[in-house]
Image (cartoon, coloured by chain):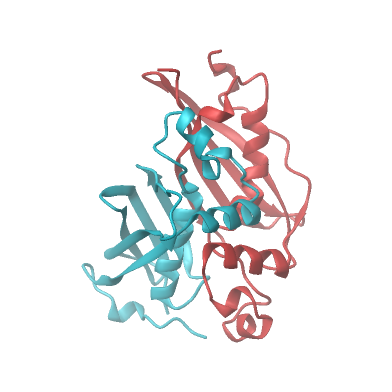
Amino acid sequence: MTAQVKYADVEVGTELPPASFPVTRLSLVKYCGASGDFNVIHWNERIAKSVGLPDVIAHGMFTMAQVGRYVTDWAGDPGALTSFGVRFSAPVVVPDTDGFVTVDVTGTVEEKLDGNQVAVAITARSGEAKVLTRARAVVRLP
Amino acid sequence: MPVNQDYEGRTFPATEPYEVSRVKIADFAEAIGDPSPVYRDRDAAVSAGYPDVIAPPTFPIVVTMVASAKTIADPGLGINYAMVVHGEQRFEYARPLRAGDVVTAQSTIEAIKSVGRNTMLTTRTEVRTVAGEPVCTAYSIIVERGAP
């Protein structure tokens, strides 16, 4: 497998196709187990509310993982990231329902760098909330 | 209890060596919902130019959290973990983490800042193989929310 996007084909302002990723209580339980982060605010509604949160919230790192996937899917190479940073500006609130909430992601190439690298500026929302700010990934392209 | 400013600049001992396994990577990829074969199938990873299956970009948190949890839990620092939320996270990668890597993580508290009732703690965690090869550096800001 090789990266699908070529450095030469990317311009500043190139938009990545938007994508939405579903999140359920089950996602968070699985992420607790896989990551080792069992903070109760990610699975216990009673305690989450008692510490002032609206409900159970997703791990910030779970949301960051969705955004990482968004960028690596676009680049076509899961190992293409050289730098990846986010600020968690609002929680992804995950109520106890039969449905799911989504993390809705967009991205725009904001800079072309040396070494065939491009910087992608990312936005991520859940419902009305902007859940990440200053989200930026640098990927190395062929 | 106020957070102890004396901890600014302190470097903690590196974690015990952590061996990255294919099973753990596949489990993590499943938990984040990413179906990429490069996280599961050695042949797919080799065709993509990697020596073995690689880990998703946020996988290093599994290793770095052990190191940063150790710093946060230090009773002398005075952080109340129930009031902690994740503020920022950044990784700088030398290369992807991959199955077979045996790595340690070592955290340094770079800054402790009070912002209103909150305390912001910035840590830098270096992930290296036991042979000393740098794999990635994780920068993390956690926020301890103060009592209202």
The chain displayed red equals: B
The chain displayed cyan equals: A
Q: Is residue B96 visible?
A: no
Location of residue A136 with respect to B3 vertically, above or below? below
Can you name the residue that lies furthest to the top here? B1
Name the side, left or right, on which A96 lies relative to B123: left
**Residue occupying image coordinates x 51% and y 44%:** B139
Can you name the residue that lies furthest to the left here? A13
Residue A30 sits in quarter? bottom right
**Residue occupying image coordinates x 62% and y 70%:** B54
Of residues A25 and A96, the one nearer the viewer is A96
Q: In x, y percent, where is residue B17?
A: 78, 51
Q: In x, y percent, where is residue B6?
A: 58, 17
**Residue occupying image coordinates x 44% and y 70%:** A72
Of residues B148 and A96, the one nearer the viewer is A96
**Residue occupying image coordinates x 51% and y 54%:** A25
Q: How many marks?
A: 0
| On-image quarter of the N terminus of chain B | top right
Name the side, left or right, on which B39 lies relative to A104: right
Q: In x, y percent, where is residue A59?
A: 50, 48
Q: Is residue B110 visible?
A: yes
Residue B56 sits in quarter? bottom right
Q: In x, y percent, where is residue B33?
A: 52, 67
Location of residue B12 with respect to B63 vertically, above or below? above
